[in-house]
């Protein structure tokens, strides 16, 4: 039995998973945590990690390393995603992580990021032969996958992460109706190729993983709309989600922060995240929604154990 640590260096948060593995195909999660870094703040659309964000990232790796040490993990596998891979100083950033903390970071491309998200979701949700639409909303990129229990039949990473959209549109607080329409028109143009694949594979269910969907679940659980048990996935009633969506886009940041179950790290970005989610649901006539607590880091463990 050995212990491994996975660090998912996202644009908004650096996520940590520590697991004990038996050397074959099973593992047990010992710790799952996250630290807010806002790595894309102030520079993501200029392809740079600004000094304050750079420092937050280095500090978060250091804090995660302390947690890894406490659990006695044998190995650390770190994966850098959109903000780092697109930044002109991204290579220097991972070099500094290596030099300061002794952690080797692998920069993965968008296709691999999407595949790891799929492998994570597949562990949390009991998929069948039907194709579903899978979505991981990030700060730098959004991964969209169409797949079933056997394979991802199509996947793509779009540079439409919420940190990018926030800096691009700089919406009012609360966002106005005209601004919502402006964002939706932009998404329609940027996601034109997705429509072709949805038409071909006909998914009726959307499965969302990570930050924004975790927040939807937390808020809906706090207000009693769903049973917030400890399962790795949960069905979220569409009417409950739509009510939450309408509430989020009508509130100010101060009001959102006071919503029970709201993740403080998501207050600023959750409005554009729900606009993105709602757009996909309405645009493609999605009938069902599921939240998955498993994403990239769980997919990385599965891939490591299965030798793929």
Image (spheres, rainbow, N blue to C red):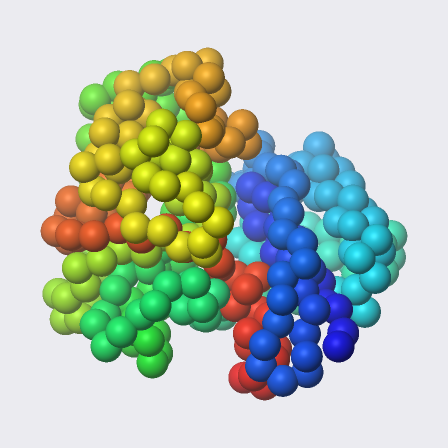
Left or right for 7, reference 81: right
The image shows residue 62, relative to residue 18, as above or below, that is: above
Q: Could you say which is closer to the camera, residue 52 or residue 271?
A: 271
The image shows residue 138, relative to residue 131, as above or below, that is: above
Quarter of the image where one finds residue 260 = top left
The image shows residue 21, relative to residue 276, as above or below, that is: below
Q: Is residue 4 visible?
A: yes
What is the x, y in percent for residue 75? 78, 69
Residue at 29% in and 45% down? 236
The image shows residue 8, relative to residue 114, as above or below, that is: above
What is the x, y in percent for residue 91? 70, 58
What is the x, y in percent for residue 52? 71, 32
Quarter of the image where one finds residue 168 = top left
Q: Is residue 65 visible?
A: no
Left or right for 20, reference 248: right
Left or right for 105, reference 261: right
What is the x, y in percent for residue 212? 42, 41
Residue at 55% in and 74% down? 302
- Counting every numbered tag in the picture gives 0
Residue at 48% in and 38% down? 163
Residue at 36% in and 51% down? 234
Q: Quadrant of the N terminus?
A: bottom right
Q: Could you say which is closer to the camera, residue 290 or residue 203?
A: 290
Q: Quadrant of the C terminus?
A: bottom right
């Amino acid at each position: 039995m050995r212990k491994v640590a996975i660090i998912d260096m996202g644009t908004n948060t650096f996520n940590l998973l520590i697991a004990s593995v038996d050397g074959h195909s099973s593992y047990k999660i010992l710790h799952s945590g996250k630290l807010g870094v806002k790595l894309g703040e102030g520079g993501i659309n200029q392809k740079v990690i600004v000094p304050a964000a750079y420092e937050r990232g280095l500090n978060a790796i250091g804090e995660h390393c302390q947690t890894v040490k406490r659990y006695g993990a044998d190995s650390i596998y770190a994966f850098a995603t959109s903000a780092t891979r697109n930044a002109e100083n991204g290579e220097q950033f991972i070099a500094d992580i290596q030099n300061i903390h002794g952690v080797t970071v692998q920069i993965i491309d968008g296709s691999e990021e999407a595949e790891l998200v799929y492998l994570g979701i597949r562990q949390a949700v009991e998929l069948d032969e039907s194709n579903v639409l899978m979505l991981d909303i990030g700060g730098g990129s959004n991964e969209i996958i169409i797949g079933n229990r056997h394979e991802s039949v199509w996947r793509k990473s779009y540079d439409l992460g919420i940190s990018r959209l926030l800096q691009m549109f700089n919406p009012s607080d609360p966002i106005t109706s005209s601004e919502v329409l402006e964002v939706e028109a932009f998404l329609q143009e940027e996601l034109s190729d997705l429509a072709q694949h949805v038409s071909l594979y006909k998914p009726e269910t959307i499965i969302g993983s990570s930050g924004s969907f975790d927040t939807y679940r937390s808020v809906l659980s706090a207000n009693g709309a769903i049973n917030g048990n400890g399962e790795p996935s949960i069905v979220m009633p569409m009417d409950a989600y739509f009510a939450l969506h309408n509430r989020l886009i009508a509130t100010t940041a101060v009001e959102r922060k006071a919503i029970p179950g709201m993740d403080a790290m998501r207050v600023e970005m959750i409005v554009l995240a729900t606009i993105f989610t709602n757009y996909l649901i309405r645009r493609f006539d999605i009938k069902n929604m599921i939240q998955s607590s498993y994403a990239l880091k769980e997919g990385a463990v599965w891939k490591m154990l299965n030798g793929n």
